[in-house]
Image (cartoon, grey):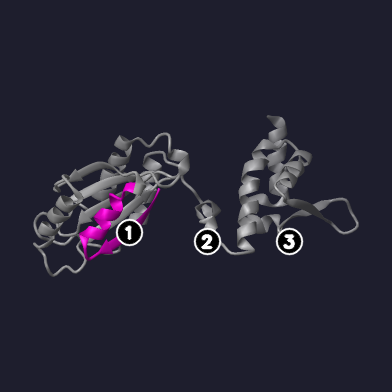
Amino acid sequence: MISKIGKAQEFRSVVNYILEQGKGTEILDSDGVLLYSPDSIIRTFNLQAELNPRLSKPVGHISLNFSVQDKEKLSNELMVQIAHDYMSRMGILETQYLIGRHYDKEHPHLHLIFNRVNDYGRTISDRFDHTRSEKVCKELTLEYGLYFASGKEKINEHRLCEPDKTKYEIFNCLKSVIPQSQNWDQLIVALKDQNIGVAFNYKEETDEIQGIIFNKNGYFFSGSKVDRQFSYSRIDQQLKLGEQK
C-alpha cells in the first residue's frame, strides 16, 4: 500500500476528478457533505473552507494504492476501514471528507478528498505529511496482512529507459520462471522462450562456473546486476530446492 498526497486551492477540480464517469467511481464513505450532486458536494466543502479564508490550499487529496495481489481480499468495507485508520493516524479528524473507489486501473485504489479546514475552523496540519504517510502506509500494510512490494517490484516499468527497461524485463521474467524450473536445462529453455539468452562465466582453465550473464535486446547483464538474488550461486540454490520438492 502506498499513498500519493496532493493539495489544491479549489474543490471543484478534485471532486470532478474523483466522480469522473470513466473512473467507474463508487462513493464508499463520506461525512459532512451533501451527496445530491457534484455541485452540492463542492458547495458544502466551500462553506466550511470559508471558516479559515487565510488558508490558500484548503483541499486535501490523497490516493491510497494497493497491490494487484490484494485485489481479492479488498472489499469496499475493508478499504473504508483501512482509509479510516489511515486518516486517524494522519490526524485527518473532525472534518468533511469523501472516499471514492476507482476501477480504471488494474490495481485497487481509492481517493480521499477532505477539507483541511476542520469543523472548528482550524487548519489540519500538513507538516511532514509525506514522511508520516509513508510510515503509516507501511504500518497498515503489515497490520492488515497486505502485500509488501520491495526493491524493483515498486518500479513503474513504463517510465524506464534502456538499458534499465530490458534489465527490469529480465528481472520480472526470472521472478516468474525460476520457481517453475527444477534444473538449469528447464530454466534456460524457459528464458529462451522469452527471448532471454544465458551464458556462463568459468574459472580460468576449469569447468567451474563462477557467474552468469543474461542478454536480451542486445543488452548484457551479470546475474547480480539484475538483482543480487539472481547471481549464479543463488539461482543454483533455488533450483536445487526445486529438485527436492
Identity, as a three-letter code, of the amino acid under mark 3: Gly
Image coordinates for residue 234, horizontal then vertical, percent? 68, 47
In 3D space, how far apart are the residues under numbered discs 2 and 1 (Cα atoms)? Answer: 20 Å
Q: Disc 3 or 1, which lies upstream in sequence?
A: 1
Q: Nearer the viewer, mark 2 or mark 1?
A: 2
Q: Is residue 189 above or below residue 211?
A: above
Does 4 appear in magenta? yes
Q: Would you name the residue on which mark 2 appears?
A: 159
Type of the residue with mark 1: Ile
Residues 118 and 202: in front is: 118
Q: Residue 46's quadrant in the figure? A: bottom left
Circle 3 — which element? loop
> Could you tell me how far apart the alpha carbons at marks 2 and 3 are, in whole angstroms?
20 Å
Labelled pair 3, 1 in contact (Cβ < 8 Å): no
- State the residue lying farthest toward the top: 245
Q: CA distance from mark 3 to mark 1?
A: 39 Å
Dot 3 corresponds to which residue? 218
- Image position of 175 (left or right of 3): right
CB contact under 8 Å: marks 2 and 3: no
Q: Nearer the viewer, residue 24 or 169?
A: 24
Residue 91 shows up from this direction:
no
